[in-house]
Image (cartoon, rainbow, N blue to C red):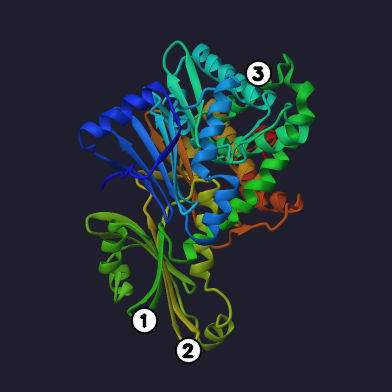
Amino acid sequence: MDLSLRGIEWQLLTEDGRSWLGACAVAPVDVCLVKLSHRRRVVRLPGGIFVKEIHYRGLRSLFKTVIGGNAWREGRTLLELTRRGVHVPQVLAIGVEHRRGMLQRDLLVTREVPGARSLSEFVLQEFDNLPFSQKRGCVAQFAAFIRQLHDQGVLQPDLHIGNILVQGGQTEVRFVLLDADRVRLKSEPLSHQERVRNLALLLGNFWTLDAAPQHFRFHFFKDYSKQNCIAREGKFIEAIAQAALGVFRKLWKVHARRCLFNNKRFISKRQHGFRVFRVHRSDVEAALQELLPDPDRILERGAVLKDGRTVKAARVELGGVCYFLKRYNCKGWTYRVRNAVRRSRAVRTWWVSWAFRVRGLPVPEPLICLEERRFRLLGRSYILSRYVENAERLNDVWPRCDDSERRGLLAGLAMLLGRMHRFGALHGDLKWQNILLQARADGGTITLTDLDGSRIMGRFMRKRPAKDLARFLRDLEERDEAGGYKAFFLHSWRKWSR
């Protein structure tokens, strides 16, 4: 793979850019592909140099000749951001190529930000392990960085933590804005509504992260608003939360639907008389090859966990890996006809499981869904998911816990179920045996299982979460003679579900 610079007219060339261009002319350059699409390519060159190359054809070429190419405009935006004091990658060169007066391609050459990593990696891998004082310093500097953007009239419509770099470490960090091609620059600070919408995008990022998102958000808003009392900004924060919910419910719906179609992450096809939906991974492909053409053969030799008229489930082993396999039984001709024009229970559970996962809710990873139909009449259907190892049911763990451990469990469950209901998800069968606990060195994890009756609300209705919670409370009341645990749990759940 090479990078051709022939025909390029350099509209901007800094001193460092001239040095880079001179080195390219002396010797061939090794090019490492970073990103590739139909018209766009990003490559990395030795010395930490990134080149974004965009091609234009047909009417798009005519249109971009008039208004300017994407790489050219992004380069100009980066230069203006630098002038306004915003940390961005250093621009080395901006070049364009014309043929017969029409723009054919443009290039943006920038220098790598040394020692930087994405904010998403920083929050997930490092932030939770920092001392409290360093956490507060990081959040304060991040809030100051975002407020600087807004005060300087910088509107990033694609503001998410993958587009922000963190540079530095133990004592001080610096934040750098990436992907400025969609940035809009205003001559005055952003309005209240623009700030709300922009911060809503940022808030949604931390909703689905596991590492200290609550501390991050609380202190962020306190530092961003410059208020010692966060309660004074309650309406502002609530407006941001509601806007974030509106934005991310649409995104979650789009992302969950991908599990039903062919794309980079999922595969949908017919095989051995089954409609197959599966994750696009080599280990899942190997498991599917063992499962077909007769899933019942695998199910019968597994360790049966449930065997009833409606479903049969077992722990099975495929290629040395443990999985959970569930079969939805065909219950006769009435069952076949009734399901002829609607999705099978397996496919509905497959979709809702991914709807939970895109919301960051802990459910076993579904890997394969099989649906057997002949002339649209439904037969058997199956779901294969990751088996949750070394886990115990909540009703088995509870008797061994003391009072403080029980309250800790209830606090974690209240936060999880509150977030689940706030995000518009209903479990449908929250009995304690459907809640699994895994003990780990850094604490414990909670996993929700048996999503056959789960749903995603089209619009938020307050009575539905309370009804969904009733099954959980029934099991809690049987073990709460004094009544204190129920009051404690509901107080925490209300805080997280609003």
Kindly give the residue lying farthest to the front in the view shown: 100
Q: Residue at x 28, y 57 (%)?
A: 283
Q: How far is disc 2 from disc 3 in space, using C-alphas?
A: 62 Å
Q: Residue at x 57, y 57 (%)?
A: 254
Q: Earlier in the sequence, mark 2 or mark 3?
A: 3
Where is residue 163? Give x, y as percent: 50, 35
Residue denoted by label 3: 223
Kindly give the residue lying farthest to the left in the view shown: 27
The secondary structure type at the circle numbered 3 is helix
**Quick check: 180 above or below 55?**
above
Q: How far is disc 1 from disc 2 in space, using C-alphas?
A: 11 Å
Residue denoted by label 1: 273
Where is residue 282? Give x, y as percent: 28, 58
Q: Residue at x 58, y 59 (%)?
A: 454
Residue 375, disc: 2
Q: Earlier in the sequence, mark 1 or mark 3?
A: 3
Front residue of 271 and 462: 271
The secondary structure type at the circle numbered 1 is loop
Query: Split into 4 quadrants, where in the image is the C terminus?
Result: top right
Front residue of 147 and 95: 95
The secondary structure type at the circle numbered 2 is loop
Assess disc 3: are there few (<14), some (14-19) or many (≥20) residues with their C-alpha within 10 Å of its C-alpha: many
Report whether 313 appears left or right of 234.
left
Asked where in the image residue 15 lies, by quadrant, the reply is top left
Where is residue 119? Give x, y as percent: 48, 30
Q: Amino acid at mark 2?
A: Phe
Front residue of 465 and 139: 139
Front residue of 278 and 111: 111
Q: Earlier in the sequence, mark 1 or mark 2?
A: 1
